[in-house]
Amino acid sequence: MKRFFGRALWRNLLAISFVISEIAALMLLVAYAASYYYLVYFLSLLANALVVISLVSRDVNPEFKITWLVVVIFLPFVGGLLYIMFYSRRLSRAETRLSKRIAELHDGSRAEERDASVSLSNLEALAKLDTAAAGQAMSLLRDDTYSKLYCDSSIKYFPLGEQMFESLLSDLRAAERFIFLEYFIIHDGEMWRQIFAVLKEKVREGIEVRIIYDDLGSMSSLPEELGRECEKIGIRCVPFGRVTPSITSAHNNRDHRKICSIDNKIAYTGGVNISDEYINKIERFGHWKDGGVRIEGRGATGFTRLFLVNYSLAAKCEEDPSPYLDEDYPVLSDGGFYIPFGDGPAPLSPGYTAKNAIMNMINQSQSYLYVTTPYLVIDYDLTEALRNAAKRGVDVRIITPGIPDKKVVKIMTKSAYPYLLAGGVRIFEYAEGFIHEKTFLSDGKIGLIGSVNLDYRSLVHHFEDALWIYGSSELAFVREELLKTMKSCREIDERDARLSFIERCIRGFVKFFAPLL
């Protein structure tokens, strides 16, 4: 309790209270302006008309347009202000300068030039094997300007967080050059203390260690104390998206990534944060089923690059990434092709990278498509893609939690069931507890594993990461484990999917505002 109510929490609560105060002040200003009714009414109509024209002309998901149009039209003047403040992230001058500088550094580095040529030759090799998969890869490479297609790598899939943690500790102990950690949540506990003990030892050996944690995601874990303790022993530790007492859409853009990069030779990603429930040292919602992937070889470079980009943004610094990306790799391959990629809000990222990758997987599936996700709050495009895949004979199966971590989100997840079931999609709820894993597997030859949930926050607002996989021999093990997980699930039928009257009311309200959340 002392830790939870520490300075970090109070700092963030104070910042949030300032934001609420600013919004209240705007509302009072509008109320005061009501005394000049005709002038304000005319200006609000003009502002609303401009906002509506701007909304209609934007090339974005229609669901976002509809929700914002209703807000703007039914909340004259206030709706327009909310749209201007929160519709999309606006970069500060410092962020704009920094993002341009990062792009220049990546484009000009020796490692970038080398990886670009390697990626092109790998794409040509993939096209000879599978033109459809090469098309997916090409689309992904165009969406994420920092991603490359790698061979000379091997992966290992972990169906449980505790298995992944054991491997991670072993690799951390063997680090020789640097350790980069980027996590949405870092909570004090047995998992963090074991990692921190290894990091302290590595720093004493002269190994460079850097940490990024999300300021809001790690609110209750005393990030200031964590930062001071790390800096004291030589670990460079920075919060991402620090909560500040100002109205800005940047507060909505959290760093949801889970990346560990070691020596640019090994990297980890998946659903596992640094907190004890992820490795079942404590129980919160029954058994916590999580998973992830370890990549060794040239493909680890992609995650090193993603980390350095977000570190530069969080620390507001400029540095040449080349020394961390140049490395001589041993010949190492399991026959797979890999694209480590990141996603984030516009304009820092092109946007919808993860969604497009998932849509391509769904649309090109021929035999089966297996999905695990803790949340199923998806838009019309993804819903129809899943239904259409099932209608053309693809065995589409989605695994969701049996015990939810958020009751409202569970109602939203459940509300997606009836329409998907009617289209032939099979849905399984993990009976033993909460499944937090984010894994996609198509036809045994294409997979996607990372931090991406099937909800608006992951697909639109958050900074995410994942590994796109083609042809790895490890995918057979992924399929085996997903089928094994389904045996611990309860398959949902139409009767199970029915919503009560209260649930339908909650669904209608939340679903309408989901694109804004």
Image (tube, rainbow, N blue to C red):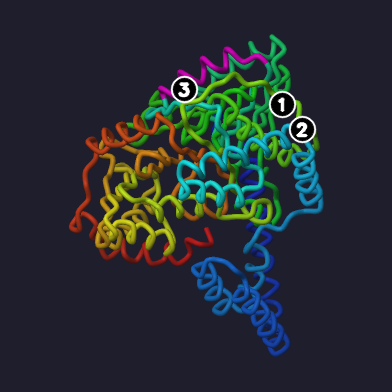
Cβ–Cβ under 8 Å for marks 2 and 1: yes
Q: Quadrant of residue 12?
A: top right
Q: Quadrant of residue 149?
A: top right
If you read the primary sequence from the N terminus, does the residue marked by circle 2 or circle 1 appear first? 2
Q: Earlier in the sequence, mark 1 or mark 3?
A: 3
Q: Which residue is mark 1?
A: 326
- Give the residue at mark 3: 165
Q: Position of residue 311 (x, y in %)?
A: 70, 36
Seen in the picture, residue 6 relative to 343 is either above or below; the reply is: above
Foreground residue among 86 and 19: 86
Q: Is residue 167 magenta?
A: yes
User: Is disc 2 placed on a helix, strand or loop?
Assistant: helix
Front residue of 7/445: it is 445
x 48%, y 48%: residue: 131
Q: CA distance from mark 1 to mark 3?
A: 27 Å
Q: Is residue 496 above or below residue 36?
A: above
Q: Is residue 253 visible?
A: no
Which secondary structure class fits the magenta region best? helix
Residue 119: x %, y % from top left: 62, 38
Residue 451 visible in the displayed image: yes
- Number of other residues with Cα within 10 Å of mark 2, as a class: few under 14, some 14 to 19, many 20 or more: some
Q: Where does residue 39 sit, x and y in percent of width and height?
A: 73, 87
* Residue under numbered circle 2: 110
- Left or right, 74 with reference to 35: left
The disc labelled 3 sits on which kind of residue? Answer: Phe
Position of residue 188 measured from the top left corner of the image (x, y, whole percent): 53, 25
Q: Amino acid at mark 1?
A: Asp
Which region shows up in magenta? 162-176
Q: Residue at x 34, y 32 (%)?
A: 476
Regarding mark 3 in the picture, which secondary structure is present there? Answer: helix
For label 3, the crowd category at 10 Å Cα-Cα, with few meaning under 14, some 14 to 19 and many 20 or more, is some
Q: Secondary structure at mark 1?
A: loop
